Image: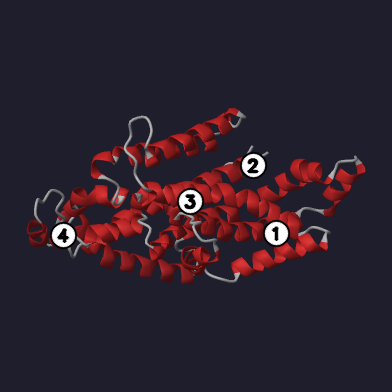
Amino acid sequence: MPPPRPRLGILGWCRARLFATPLNVLLTVLLAWLLLMLLPPLVQWAWLRADFSASTPQQCRAAGGACWAFIAHDYRLILFGVYPYDEQWRPLVAAIVLLAVIICSAVRRFWHPALALAWVAALAAVAVLMWGGVLGLTSVEDSRWGGLPLTMILSTFGIAFAFPLGLLLALGRRSRMPAVKALCVVYIELIRGVPLISLLFMSSVMLPLFLPEGVDIDKLLRAQIAIIMFAAAYIAETVRGGLQAVPRGQYEGAESIGLSYWQTMRKIILPQALRIVIPPLVSIFISLFKDTSLVVVIGIFDLTQSAKAALADPQWRGFSIEAYLFIAAIYFIFCFSISRYSRSLEARIYSR
């Protein structure tokens, strides 16, 4: 059982957390002053003087506050990009299906082999809904995909494929075979030594130059490969740190009972190493979800590019703060949810 929490009351909590030392007193006073200076104007702009239902931009500007009516007017363009307007129910359903299978994967009661079949069915459903061309759905090229569903697809596939690749790279870097170790070291150091935006440019501009004539790889697929390669290198170094933290006696104990290398890694070493590196792995996943916004540099309509497209409307120009606050709220909800789940998972694992 965890120890009981001390009951200090409100005054005791404030004395212990806010006024325990002179430095804490100074920081508390400064923070209170900043909140008093910033919160009233912010509340007045974002809520009291904001316009939620204006039919024209002139009415929004006359209100003198935030124009949330702009979000209500162009939310479909922000969320779904240039996907055909009459078919936008398809990316909505695809995003819901993808989110549902991710949530099911986070719940322990669903951790059984049938979950893999659920993932296969969900990914097939997402592909059918987004591409179409079957079951009476009109065909839509992936160049017209955009918004939140595209961000979720890039991040989900990036994490799903980068994680096992990162595990193999981490094991390869600690391998006793010189050739395998050298290849893994070169790959990890090379990819980690360049920013993601350079890999995206390489995949979009340079890769087609090396392909045979008549062979072309879709731009979205090239961006997805670049994201996977980038994330796998960082996951590999994180997992390698976890492998080094496992005591040597665990390896020797596995050898003493006759386990093979892969049995040792699968049953003894990797479970302990992954438990150690849960926090940095979650940080990589969150960064990967946010870094998908960089695909805008190669002309892919992610959530950020969709917001820019909405701001290009000549009638609704000048409301960029509202648009970026809207997509920032979306990113925050997803990243905060991942962070909270990782904390609960870590607490559940370490409480055993």
Q: Could you say where residue 228 lies in the image, as x and y percent from the top left?
A: 55, 55
| Mark 1 / mark 3, whichever is N-terminal | 3
| Mark 4 closeness class: few <14, some 14–19, many ≥20 residues within 10 Å | some
Please identify, in this view, whether the residue under mark 3 or under mark 2 is nearer the observer: 3
Please identify, in this view, whether the residue under mark 1 or under mark 4 is nearer the observer: 4
Local SS, label 4? helix
Q: Is residue 210 above or below residue 142?
A: below
- Tell me which amino acid carries mark 3: Ser
Residue 153 vs residue 325, the one in the foreground: 153
Task: Classify residue 111 by image quadrant.
Answer: top right
Q: Could you say where residue 74 lies in the image, as x and y percent from the top left?
A: 21, 51
User: Could you give the CA–CA distance between mark 1 and mark 4, rounded to whole angstroms?
Assistant: 50 Å
Locate the C terminus by quadrant.
Answer: top right
| Mark 3 closeness class: few <14, some 14–19, many ≥20 residues within 10 Å | many
Local SS, label 2? helix
Q: Could you tell whether 108 is left or right of 265 in the image?
A: left
User: Could you give the CA–CA distance between mark 3 and mark 2, rounded to whole angstroms?
Assistant: 25 Å
Q: Marks 2 and 1: CB-CB under 8 Å?
A: no
- Residue located beneath label 4 in the image: 316
Task: Classify residue 169 by image quadrant.
Answer: bottom right
- Tell me which amino acid carries mark 4: Trp
Query: Any mark on residue 317, and which?
Result: none
| Mark 3 / mark 2, whichever is N-terminal | 3
Please identify, in this view, whether the residue under mark 1 or under mark 3 is nearer the observer: 3
| Mark 1 / mark 4, whichever is N-terminal | 1
- Residue located beneath label 3 in the image: 155
Q: Give me the residue at 89% from left, 45% from top.
A: 255
Asked whether residue 336 is in view, the answer is no
User: Could you give the CA–CA distance between mark 2 and mark 4, rounded to whole angstroms?
Assistant: 50 Å
Residue 322 vs residue 93, the one in the foreground: 93
